[in-house]
Image (tube, helix red, strand yellow):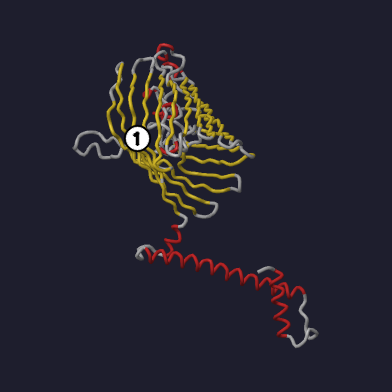
Amino acid sequence: MSKVGGLFTVLVVLGISAPSWAASTPSMEEMWRVIQKQQAEIDVLRRKLADAEQKADAAVLAVESGGAVSAHAMAANNRTHLGGYGEMHLNNLQGEGGAADKDQIDFHRFVLMVNHEFSDRLRLFTELELEHALVKDNNDGGGGTSPGEVELEQAYIEYDLNEKHRAKAGLFLLPVGILNETHEPNTFYGVERNSVEKNIIPTTWWAGGVGVSGDLAPGFSYDLALHEGLATTAGGTYNIRSGRQKTAEASSKDPAWTGRLKWTGVPGLELAGSVQLQQDITQDMDSAADQAMLYELHGVLNRGAFGLRALYAHWDLNGSGPASVGADVQKGWYFEPSWRLNEKWGVFTRYSTWDNQAGSNAGTAMDSEKTQYDVGLNYWLHENVVLKADYQVQDNDNDRNQDGFNFGVGFHF
């Protein structure tokens, strides 16, 4: 009720109860106190009515579900969201130059996501993944090894500082590259994720820490995070992917900083760059290694039926250890044009080159570069369900190549 409406009500009540206006006219202060009291009572009634409507809706849902869930739980469920994705791959690759053949079918990953809104400003994001379909105790006497892993890839709280800026804390995907944050199978071409973002960035890359993100100006956004660093040593030839700690009793002796600036000022175009700095990439486990820095640039263009993705990533690792095996420089780039034939069909091709030993040791680096060509198609049964097929050809300096077909099915809900 407006203040004017409240004032009119008071005047009507006074006109009925008073024998005459001349008898006892209330002062403006008295009328204002009456209006405030009346407005407070109306606000309380409104809140009670809204709460009653919510409980009534929840009660109806509870009855429809056989009464197995309480009305309170059903009301809370309106703020809880379930999602997920999965993909199965069939690889038929022929090895040459010492590379092994690969003939296998693998349910590569199944992911469940449960998110919850505590309030309009506070929310939770989680992501639990099962890789390779099976996890078992390798010491159970049954023989063999377990191919799978259960991984918690996201579990963080996000809070809106204001309309333009957000803060988060917990376990989250790092703001680097194209695929690391958005890698549901229906959102990209190719059965397997591209080798550059897998081996150089390395996707999927998550870490425990804190971060802030937001909008700086129209079209410009930023991300800044302080999180656990990598822990790669000479035992892993300082390979970036092998250094992910995955927030499993991870060392926090030397955290890392990651920052990203993104521009989306033109519809269908994204340009972004990320930088990460870590003072000791081995977490004090290897005195022969020191500071490491990652630079990453990428662009994504979608204009009508035409699509284009391009990315460059480059690591510099300091220290005599990485330099001794050529791992002081690790870099890669790819270029991927695509064409959406219609609502269902799309085709693509990709050129990728990457090298995890591209550094100062020439004897090692000469045969470490890897190159791959891909061509293939996607068929979307639904915007969130996709069938994929592609053919890959490798042309590696060490002649250890795997060429052949990949097939896949993926979904996202």
Residue that appears at 49% across and 65% down: 54
* Closest to the observer, 55 or 124: 55
Question: Residue 146: image x %, image y %?
Answer: 27, 36
Question: Residue 151: image x %, image y %?
Answer: 37, 40
Residue that appears at 46% across and 20% down: 328
The image quarter in which residue 38 lies: bottom right
* Closest to the observer, 187 or 112: 187
Q: Quadrant of the N terminus?
A: bottom right
Instruction: From the viewer's perspective, tell me whether residue 396 is left or right of residue 121.
Output: left
Q: Amino acid at mark 1?
A: Gly
Task: Residue at the far right: name it.
Answer: 22
SS label for mark 1: strand
Question: Residue 229: image x %, image y %?
Answer: 46, 32
* Residue 292 in view, yes or no: no
Task: Residue at the far top: name it.
Answer: 363
Residue that appears at 49% across and 53% down: 117
Determine whether 308 is above or below 70 in the image: above
Task: Residue at the far bottom: name it.
Answer: 19
Q: Which residue is mark 1?
A: 408
Question: Residue 28: image x %, image y %?
Answer: 77, 74
The image quarter in which residue 103 lies: top left
Residue that appears at 61% across and 72% down: 41
* Closest to the observer, 329 or 50: 50
